[in-house]
Amino acid sequence: MGDVDIARVQVAGVHDLDEARLLCACGVGWIGIPLRLPVHREDLSDDAAAAVVRGCAGSGSTCVLITYLERAAEIADLARRIGVRHVQLHGACCARELTALRLALPGVVIIKSLVVRPGEDASAVYAQVGRLAPGVDAFITDTFDPATGASGATGLTHDWAVSRDIVRLSPRPVILAGGLTPGNLRQAISAVRPAGVDCHTGVEGAGGRKDEVLVRRFIAEAHAAFGAG
């Protein structure tokens, strides 16, 4: 726990296997599959998600279940159903449930979100780190949208100084998410120094599907920025 290899780049949100294979071909390390969402509509069914996971096997990319479920039994059941061992939790999952999840799904890699709200400082977010760090392998900072109530895939950035402080204080690696695009990624990495970065809407075309040109630009910017660090 806490010593897993964190992908430099995660791209979240795929509609089907073709889109996932595009991300694999571009060299995306982790492919996020959001399911059981309180605000956004899901892009694919459980069966389609399982097909994506099977189709990406051996590609060098790892599929990650992104979910707002809070109970260990439900999370483990869904992870087994689609065939993943990496889960990213955006719900209010307590330390007890994290421990239960490890027992229910041996070998699971747990990434827990830390949602940054407008005007919030690092101390408010960091209060969660002390409670949850023993049960997770990494954190991911993301942005809350007060207009929609969404705490992921908002297309909004947050105060990167908050994420920078979390990176400095956290005993676990921190992934940066929230409104990242090829255009702002170098600045974001320079400001925060995260272990990895995540994007969703920032590499999508007008139709809402991943745009190969944008994905490749995002990866190139990430490699350049991390290399410069």
Image (tube, rainbow, N blue to C red):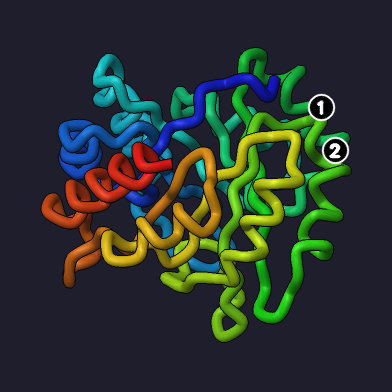
Task: Report, in whole angstroms, how far the alpha carbon at label 1 lies from the one at label 2.
Answer: 6 Å
Image point (18%, 47%), residue name: 216
Q: Secondary structure at mark 2?
A: helix
Q: Which residue is mark 2?
A: 95
Q: Which residue is mark 1?
A: 99
Asked if the residue at tag 2 contacts the one at tag 1, i.e. Cβ–Cβ closer than 8 Å, the answer is: yes
- In the figure, residue 62 lies in which quadrant? top left
Viewer-proximal residue, 200 or 190? 190
x and y, in percent, of residue 126 in the image: 80, 54
Image point (80%, 46%), residue name: 129
Q: Is residue 77 left or right of residue 199?
A: right
Quadrant holding the N terminus:
top right
Q: Secondary structure at mark 1?
A: helix
x and y, in percent, of residue 138 in the image: 63, 36
Image point (57%, 77%), residue name: 145
The amino acid type found where label 2 is placed reads Ala
